[in-house]
Image: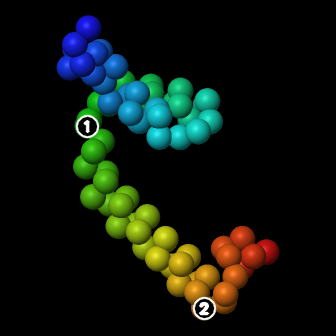
Amino acid sequence: MPFRRLAKLFGPGVVTGASDDDPSGIATYTQAGAAFGLGTVWLMLFTIPLMTAVQEACARLSLVTRRGLFANLS
């Protein structure tokens, strides 16, 4: 079976499902990817800057306190 045909058969749901580790997440993301396809890609415009800001804040907090995120939370 050619790769393009195989990719169309599985679609974006498999890629979405493979992005998490737990079985319930894989099932949920696979179903969401199969239902919505690439229709939710526009959300990356909002989520990537927010994720970047959270990572930056955590990194700066750790640099200032010289402790990891978990140590700062506890």
Q: Where is residue 20 drawn, in percent x and y?
A: 53, 40
Q: Quadrant of the N terminus?
A: top left
Residue 39, numbered circle: 1
Residue 64, numbered circle: 2
Q: Residues within 10 Å of mark 1 (few under 14, many from 20)?
A: few
Q: CA distance from mark 1 to mark 2?
A: 40 Å
Q: Residue at x 41, y 69 (%)?
A: 52
Question: Does 42 sit left or right of 47 as displayed?
Answer: left
Q: Where is residue 55 drawn, in percent x and y?
A: 49, 71
At label 2, the amino acid type is: Val
Q: Where is residue 59 drawn, in percent x and y?
A: 53, 78
Q: Residue furthest top?
A: 1
Q: Residue at x 56, y 76 (%)?
A: 58
> Along the polypeptide, which appears first: circle 1 or circle 2?
1
Q: Residue furthest right?
A: 74
- Element type where label 2 sits in the image: helix
- The answer to whether the residue labelled 1 contacts the one labelled 2, judged by CB atoms less than 8 Å apart, is no
At label 1, the amino acid type is: Gly
Residue 6 in view (yes/no):
yes
Nearer to the camera, 43 or 3: 3
Question: Does 67 sit left or right of 18 as displayed?
Answer: right
Q: Quadrant of residue 30?
A: top left
Q: Residue at x 47, y 34 (%)?
A: 18
Residue 33 in view (yes/no):
no
